[in-house]
Image (cartoon, grey):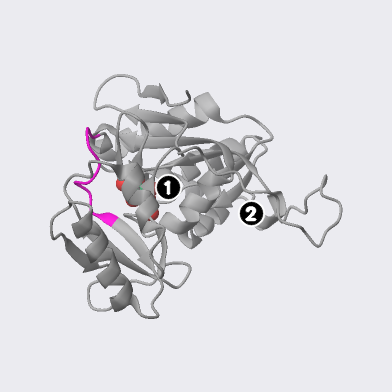
Amino acid sequence: MGRYHPPSPSVANNNTNSPRIVVVCRAASSAQKKVIMQSTSEQDEEKKAAAAQAIEKFLKDGMTIGLGSGTTSRWFVRILGEHVAKGLRVIGVPSSKSTGQLAREVGVPLADLNDVGSLDLTIDGADEIDGEGRMIKGGGANLLWEKIVACASDRMVCIVDESKVVKFLGRFPLPVEVIPFGWRSTERHLRKLLEDSGLGSPKIEMRGSEKPLITDSGHYLLDCHLEKIPDPESLGEKLNQIPGIVEHGLFIGIATDAVVAHASGEPEVLSFRS
Ligand code: 5RP
């Protein structure tokens, strides 16, 4: 499946050559930045290395960029904030409320996706990525905005530590975002689809401990424990047919590149462009 490039929506502002850019934040103090730049574990170091390498290799002055969500992306945003403080000019579009808040704290200028139209680049993490760049995302509950932001971008670079690279997708539970109205009915259709697709009788869990987690768009998440997804393209397409499912965590044909950090040595850069 190729990446979806929707037609530009009509905008109230008739001057489409000069999109209205709303800058909503300013730089944080250096003391604030020092605290948040400390990494704590080896895996954190890898996440940070992948983020730094992606910036170095793919990000250019003047770009509009999608800002991913999750712990790896948070390193990316923090490092980006340091570059902005040194003079890099970028406009960011966050893929979650929490990323937006962090970006404001570290001084990355932000805009609304509707105002910038399309993005040059998105840098985001993943829960799993295979050798063809197919991913599972949504472990941080942000898959809907992440997919919209990534699909609005000319290039999407996935940043991961090596633990996320898999031969087959599915060990990480596949998140499916559903509308609260009638969600039990949606879940029944989902279960039937998974069974009919030869995936056995998988456990489907509502995200959230005591009460359902509510996503940034006000939806629920159903995590499907599938272990192995033999045909991610086909499953992704079928999931899109079920009423009540807003989006799912299979990101197919979206990543153009990946930066994989290893415990030792330089991060590896992979390209999935044909
Ligand atoms: C959030 C995501 C994240 O990118 C994914 O969960 C990876 O997160 P982390 O970098 O914390 O491992 O998809 O919805």
Q: Which residue bears the numbered disc 2?
A: 113
36 sits left or right of 40 in the view: right
**Residue 53 x, y percent position in the rendering:** 44, 27
Q: Nearer the viewer, residue 118 or 232?
A: 232
Query: In this orientation, does residue 28 appear?
Result: no
Which residue lies at the image location 53% right of the left edge and 52% below the top edge? 148
Dominant secondary structure, magenta: loop
Ligand 1 closer than 8 Å to the CB at disc 1? yes
Q: Is residue 212 magenta?
A: no
**Residues packed near mark 1 inside 10 Å, few (<14), some (14 to 19) or many (20 plus):** many
Which residues are the magenta region?
166-174
Which residue lies at the image location 33% right of the left edge and 76% below the top edge? 183
**Residue 193 x, y percent position in the rendering:** 26, 60
Q: Is residue 195 above or below residue 7?
A: below
Q: Of tags 1 and 2, which is closer to the observer?
A: 2
**Residues packed near mark 2 inside 10 Å, few (<14), some (14 to 19) or many (20 plus):** many
- Give the quarter of the figure containing the N terminus: top left
Rendered image: mark on residue 74: 1
Residue furthest top as drawn: 265
Labels 1 and 2: the sequence-earlier one: 1
- Dot 2: what SS? helix
Ligand 1 closer than 8 Å to the CB at disc 2? no
**Residue 204 x, y percent position in the rendering:** 20, 65
Q: Is residue 168 magenta?
A: yes
Q: Quadrant of residue 82?
A: top right
Residue furthest left as drawn: 200
Q: Nearer the viewer, residue 202 or 90?
A: 202
Q: Is residue 144 above or below residue 232?
A: below
